[in-house]
Image (cartoon, rainbow, N blue to C red):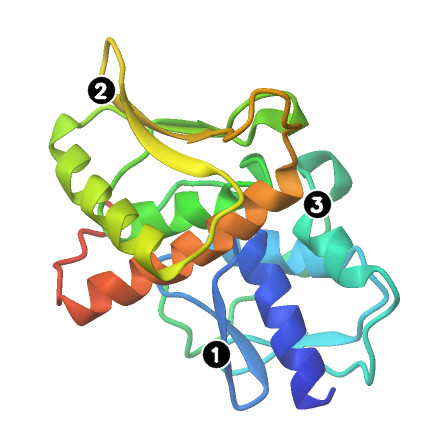
Amino acid sequence: MNKRNLLELRDSLRRRGFWVDIVEAEFVLDSWYSRSNFNELVRLLNQFPLSLEIGEKGIRINSDSLPSGLLKQIETASREDVKYSIKGNLIPSSWNYNERNDLAILELDYGIAALVFALNKVGFQTSMSCDGHGRKEANMWFNHLEYMKEISNLLFSASKENSFAYDWEIRKENVGFALATRKRLANEAWDVSKIQDDVFSLSNLILKEISLNNRKIEIGS
């Protein structure tokens, strides 16, 4: 598979919530994920006409090209789209994983899965999430009010560096708070693909900002 196809597939997997890097032509899942998450990733890829094998640290895809429509199918896959497969039981021998993580990526709505991953990775534990299914706003809920200020600061930084389809805001709830989208025009239609575009940009920025500021990442706490 050529470099362009590798990068396009990497970004589609990230948009679906599986944050992978390409290391020596292998798709290596971030060490925040668990063995169960790796099996989810293998099951997802096994739904498509791709030739793949378990590598040293990740998944090696031997297909020369990407079938038409594959990337969109990956980005919008739901739990119901992914059948159980016994092929998802092998783990790369040199991949570092987090067994304490119990978040099932395929259970998350595809429109906001990447952001749920990014927030949880850097220590902002979500309690629930919903991408709105094209009918209403996307929401990510938090029980811990102490996250509010730092997430607000991240949104402020993001607004200076990115142009988003929707406004993103913090909303106080009876218990905790929510990070939610808001339409700019009352008659504007909700579009999950645009929410996913925003989410992908936000996720990249959050991971970059946290890394640059050397914020301590609390995994599985």
The residue pinned by badge 1 equals: 57
Left or right of residue 141, residue 4 in this image: right
The residue labelled by disc 2 is 176
Q: Which residue is mark 3?
A: 77
Residue located at (48% from left, 48% from top): 164
Which quadrant of the figure has residue 106?
top right
Disc 3 to disc 1, how far (Cα)? 24 Å
Residue at the image point whose x is 80% and y is 81% from the top: 63
Q: Nearer the viewer, residue 61 or 87?
A: 61
Quadrant of the rendering where the N terminus is positioned: bottom right
- Amino acid tagged 3: Ala
Q: Nearer the viewer, residue 138 or 85?
A: 138
Is residue 213 at all visible to an observer of this figure?
yes
Give the number of the disc on residue 217: none
Where residue 116 appears, as percent x and y from the top left, is 41, 43
Which tag, 2 or 1, sits closer to the chain's start? 1
